[in-house]
Amino acid sequence: MINKERLLRDNRLCKAIIGLLVEELKNLAAEFSACYLIYRKKNRKDHERQMGAGQKGFIPTPLDKLLFILLYLKCYPTYDLQGLLFGLDRTRVCRWVKMALLNNLTV
């Protein structure tokens, strides 16, 4: 898994990896979190469970999800490499990338 704490301490590293400064990333993360929550509520199937119950996601936080897709868009790694960096299987990476890009979660 990518060392998120190290990335958020170093402007130069953050700019090199995802193309944003730390402050820009934090601002974008706040907006992304709100948009992602709206997306989840809107595209949720009717379940008996409460929001947040059940199996936890493989990419745990909205900030991690944002880092995942920004790294993909800047560096365009193979699904195998992206999976290695985030601890996922390449098929899960493929699903995440398609979901994010097709639903405009990066805007």
Image (cartoon, helix red, strand yellow):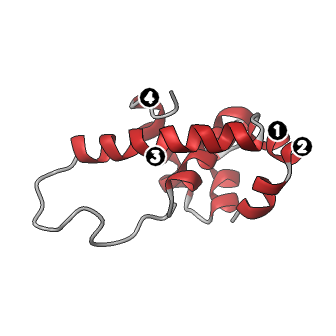
Question: Mark 1 and mark 3: span between their CA atoms?
Answer: 21 Å
Label 2: which secondary element: helix
Per the image, the residue denoted by label 4 is 104
The image quarter in which residue 8 lies = bottom right
Per the image, the residue denoted by label 1 is 15
User: Mark 4 or mark 2, which is nearer the start of the sequence?
Assistant: 2
Q: Residues within 10 Å of mark 3 (few under 14, many from 20)?
A: some
103 over 43 or under it: above or below: above
The residue under the point 64% across, 39% down is 70
Per the image, the residue denoted by label 3 is 33
Q: Nearer the viewer, residue 28 or 46?
A: 28
The residue under the point 80% across, 45% down is 14
Q: Residue furthest right?
A: 12
Question: Mark 3 and mark 2: span between their CA atoms?
Answer: 24 Å
User: Mark 4 or mark 1, which is nearer the start of the sequence?
Assistant: 1
Discs 1/4, front: 1
The amino acid pointed to by label 2 is Arg
Determine which of the numbered discs, if any, sits on residue 78 in the image.
none
Question: Mark 4 and mark 3: span between their CA atoms?
Answer: 13 Å
User: Mark 3 or mark 1, which is nearer the start of the sequence?
Assistant: 1
Per the image, the residue denoted by label 2 is 12
Q: Residues within 10 Å of mark 4 (few under 14, many from 20)?
A: few
Label 3: which secondary element: helix
The amino acid pointed to by label 1 is Lys
The answer to whether the residue labelled 4 contacts the one labelled 3, judged by CB atoms less than 8 Å apart, is no
The answer to whether the residue labelled 1 contacts the one labelled 2, judged by CB atoms less than 8 Å apart, is yes
